[in-house]
Each structure stands twice: as structure tokens, then as C-alpha cells.
Amino acid sequence: MGKKKRLKTMRRHQSPPGGAEPPEPALPELQALMPGPVPSAEELDAIQKAFQKNLRNSPLWDRMVQEFGAAKAEELLGQVGVRVDPAAHGG
């Protein structure tokens, strides 16, 4: 490999200037499609709580706690939400 190419490669793999940390990667959005009428607010709340409970009892939860710590994992779990896309229901 030539000197120029080697220097380019080295620069590409260096940390950002000023020692700044790279931004945290965004978490992917999970989507589920459910046929039928639009759920009521109570049904949406029940779906959200059931999903959070199932997540907390899954191997993914253990991995989240191990990777992010218990406090951050709880914060991420709190961000789990259920929403209805009005466009999907003709609205």
C-alpha cells in the first residue's frame, strides 16, 4: 500500500477532532401492523404495558442491562410506546 493511501486510511480511523465522542447510534424503530379497528386508548396502554413486560422478561433485557446499565435500560424501556398511524386506518 502506498504512503498516501496508508495515511488516508489512518486518518479515516482516527477519533474526531478535539477528542469528541461519536454520537450514540439511534435505536431502530420497531413497527407492528395489526389488522382491525383502531384500538381505544385503554387498549393501546394495555398493549404497551404487555410489550414492556415481555421485553423485561426476555434475553434482550439482560443484554440491554449488561450493555447500558440498569438505569439506562429502564430509561430506554420507558421510551417504548404504542401509536396508531392514522394513514393506515384511512384517516
Image (cartoon, grey):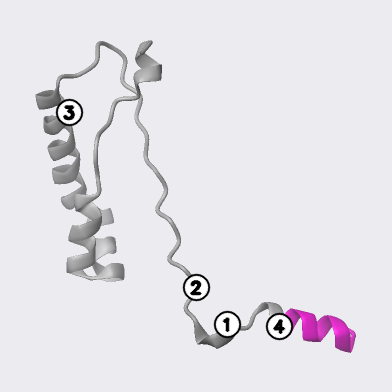
Q: CA distance from mark 3 to mark 4?
A: 49 Å
86 horizontally vs 42: left or right: right
What segment carries the magenta color?
1-10
Residue closer to the observer: 24 or 62: 24
Q: Which residue is mark 2?
A: 22
Q: Residues within 10 Å of mark 1 (few under 14, many from 20)?
A: few
Which x, y percent locates residue 15? 58, 82
Which of the two discs, 3 and 2, labels the residue nearer the N terminus?
A: 2
Q: Secondary structure at mark 2?
A: loop
Q: Label 4, on which residue?
A: 11
Label at residue 44: 3
Inspect the magenta stretch and tell me whether residue 2 lies in it: yes
> Where does the C terminus fall, quadrant-wise?
top left
Q: Nearer the viewer, residue 58 or 10?
A: 10
Quadrant of the frame with the N terminus: bottom right
Task: Decide: few, some or many residues near mark 4? Use Cα within 10 Å; few <14, some 14-19, many ≥20.
Answer: few
Residue 7 visible in the shown view? yes
**Position in image of residue 90 (x %, y %):** 38, 10
Say whether residue 62 is left or right of residue 7.
Answer: left
Q: Quadrant of residue 73?
A: bottom left
- N-terminal of the pair, mark 2 or mark 1, is 1
The reply to whether dot 4 and dot 1 touch (C-beta < 8 Å) is no
Check disc 1 and give the amino acid type.
Ser
Between the C-alphas of marks 4 and 1, the distance is: 8 Å
Proximity of marks 2 and 1: CB atoms separated by less than 8 Å: yes
At mark 4, the secondary structure is helix
The location of residue 24, given as percent across then percent down, is: 43, 66
What crowding class fits label 2: few (fewer than 14 Cα within 10 Å), some (14-19), or many (20 or more)?
A: few
* Identity of the residue drawn at 51% across and 86% down: 19
Q: Are marks 3 and 4 in contact (CB under 8 Å)?
A: no
- Residue placed under numbered mark 1 in the picture: 15
The span from disc 1 to disc 3 (Cα, nearest Å) is 43 Å
